Image (cartoon, helix red, strand yellow):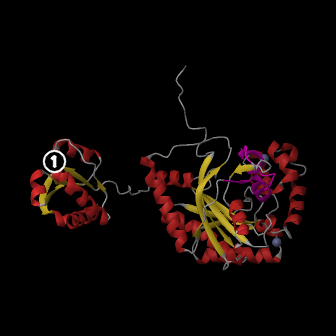
Amino acid sequence: MSKQNYQTPRGTKDILPQDQPYWIKVRETVEKTLNGLGFGRIDLPHFENSDVFTRGIGEQTDVVSKEMYFLESHSDDESIRFALRPEGTAGTVRSFIQNGMSSWSQPVRLFYFGAMFRHERPQKGRYRELYQAGVEIFGDETAKSDYLAIMSAWEILTRLGLKNIIVYTNSIGCPKCRPKYLLKLKKYYKEKLSKMCPDCQRRFETNPLRLLDCKNEVCHAFAKEAPIMLDSLCPECKTHFQDTLEYLDYFNIKYDLDPTLVRGLDYYTQTVFEIVDQADKGRQGTIAGGGRYNGLVELLGGPKTPAVGFSLGVERVISLMKEQKIEVNKPRGVEVCILQLGEKAKEISKSIYDALTKHDINVYFVPSNDGLRQQIKTASKLDAQYAVIIGQQEAVKDEIILRDLSASSQEVFPAADVAEAVKKRLIKCECAK
Ligand SMILES: [Zn+2]
Ligand SMILES: [Zn+2]
């Protein structure tokens, strides 16, 4: 039999230990920022009844029609078709309804962080298993919540140290004003359609808004001249959008209007937005995007509930952090190794281990019969800063040797003082950095 060389499936990746500091930094910043803004974390299953997505996101969208992974199930649920989640909003809405959150104190602010799955053509920076962090705000129809959604995305990205970012925003209206606009749009595109790409020819009937954000060169040129939604907004949508922009002005969030911005998903109403890197001229890599979706809760069977949210692409954020050379701290590794020689020392070592860990010091201790030189080598390989050495003599006198592994200097302490001594030195170490 030939040897198999198994590889990660196309579009997936391993996140190795050396890359984890970036992931930890993003996860912690997301949690800290959003907890601080009144959001509660929600974790959802990675798969749902596929109707949650097909109805919620829209049959005709690329995400549902081309990119969803369906699951074969051979259980008693056979009549139900499941799909891996391609995004976080539809599942959060399902949970909002299922858990009766409309009776919670409003607005309900939730956030998630986790893997999504999309069967996309793999290309640089696009993954089939991708991580997203996102927020959903339910129960407030005012521009306050549009602002809170945009601002919390902005805040996460700036706290991560990202520079040179900008918000693009647009309003795509509501069921009252959008149909009239779509008629105008179709009238404009009608004669141009034969020159446009096959995708746009298909979307003309099913999802004409998407003609505006096609990346094809010819289509893009037509989009620039197309009638814009902002001219067709009803008075409520107009006021709502103006209010949102006033908040952005007031809080100094850098933004620009983009009348061709429509987002790919059916559920959006009124405000839509994207945050991008200004150096990324072709806008290939959106860092974060979102908008308002006032009809979705009702569409999935819940009470009429206004809502707004965003999601950000964690891989995109991390690659930008690397491009912008943003430094991240390594996680605290081994701080102290306990090295012991002989049986009596081994007994004492366990109590030293307990004393140190009780003070939140990271300790590596595995009893060994190796000689001291060999044990010091092990400690160095683990990148420990200090070694606590207990030889036969020290065990008898109830003392320890504290060795600074980088300076190769050492001091003797009573065993009872070990935690204090180590703590003091570790703090000094932190300051020196
Ligand atoms: Zn409207
Ligand atoms: Zn096109």
Q: Residues within 10 Å of mark 1 (few under 14, many from 20)?
A: some
Question: Residue 192: where, in percent of width, then height?
Answer: 87, 48
**Magenta span covers which residues?**
47-75
Give the answer, above or below, for where 10 lies relative to 275.
above
Of residues 37 and 41, the one nearer the viewer is: 41
Q: SS class of the residue under badge 1?
A: loop
Outermost residue, top side? 1
Question: Residue 425: where, in percent of width, then height?
Answer: 22, 63
Q: Is residue 261 left or right of residue 226?
A: left
Give yes or no for residue 322 being in the magenta stretch: no
Give the answer, above or below, for where 42 lies relative to 207.
below
Of residues 41 and 237, the one nearer the viewer is: 41
Give the answer, above or below, for where 113 lies relative to 374.
below
Q: Quadrant of the C terminus?
A: bottom left
Q: Find ligand 1 in the image and state its quadrant.
A: bottom right
| Residue depicted at x 71% and y 65% | 93
Q: Is residue 388 left or right of residue 17?
A: left
Give yes or no for residue 51 being in the magenta stretch: yes
**Dot 1 corresponds to which residue?**
342
Figure quadrant of residue 350: bottom left
| Dot 1 beta carbon under 8 Å from ligand 2 | no
Q: Can residue 162 be seen from the camera position used here?
A: no
